Amino acid sequence: MLQIDPTQIATKDLHQYILGAVAPRPIAFASTISTDGIPNLAPYSFFNAFSSNPPILIFSSNRRVSNNTTKDTLKNVEDTGEVVINVVSHRIVRQMAVTSIEYPAPVSEFEKAGFTPLPSERVKPFRVAESPVHMECKVDRILPLGDKGGAGNLIICNIVLMHIDENVLNENGRIDPHKIDLMGRMGRFYYVRASGAAVEEIVQVVTSVGIGFDALPPGIRNSTVLTGNNLGRLASLTVLPDADTAMALAATDERVQALLQKAGVKESLHQYAKEMIDTGEVERGAEILVLAESFR
């Protein structure tokens, strides 16, 4: 594997390796306002949610690598202690990209990118009308991480009011990932759309204890057919099927019956089990794998 010592590589190159590896990242579309009342709008992907109680968001406005200067967003939050974090959906991502252009301080990115400024209720910076979620925040504190180009400034934000477009909610009043259609940032100029086929539901077991990888028989654990994801699903089961249940497949499953008549029975059964697991029939796949254990 390629090894990188951060002290032995140019910051601009290290920056790209980090951003390419730590991805995708959510985008904070940060709206601030200067003490002179000039609005500013800029996207930041060094961003995430860190606490629900208190409700804390953190994003970083890094010092420019090229000339070690800071951005208008940082100065504005230092001066006013307020920011609105807007989320970025697919339908506005190209407009958002326009705000990445470094216009002179008096210029409003709202106007340049064609966004509609909405008055906030508890802070002075404007909300972005076209964004499906706006989070009005008071800045709790700012934590500088260094004084050289590329150094971050962690802006710790306390949410004081959220606004959510009801059109992105499901029937239970929760945000639907397909309806909100968020964008994420990757390395270089790449983005990812977090909806459709890109979204996968993985149920996390919280009410019972899975058997774990170590409890899987070696013949299953060391399968040349099953993937790590397949094994992960099996390891989440609370118990493996017993041998009698597995052997019953030979009498009830026509495909199993056909496979038992061919050479390479064990590998063929593993292929069949993988198909079952990939389609969500994990217990059925487990039964087939336990049956395969009787063949060496």
Image: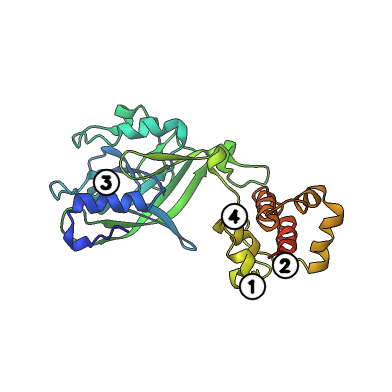
Residue placed under numbered mark 4 in the picture: 225
Tag 2 near tag 1, CB within 8 Å: yes
Pointer 1: residues within 10 angstroms few (<14), some, or many (20+)?
few
Q: Earlier in the sequence, mark 3 or mark 4?
A: 3
Residue placed under numbered mark 1 in the picture: 215
Task: Specify the quadrant that holds the C terminus.
Answer: bottom right
Front residue (pair 129, 232): 232
Q: Earlier in the sequence, mark 4 or mark 1?
A: 1
Residue placed under numbered mark 2 in the picture: 240
Coloration of the structure image? rainbow
Q: Residue furthest bottom?
A: 214
Tag 3 near tag 4, CB within 8 Å: no
Amino acid found under the numbered disc labelled 2? Leu
Circle nearer the viewer, 1 or 3: 1
Amino acid found under the numbered disc labelled 3? Thr
Q: Secondary structure at mark 2?
A: loop
Q: Earlier in the sequence, mark 1 or mark 3?
A: 3
In the visual, does 131 lie left or right of 271?
A: left
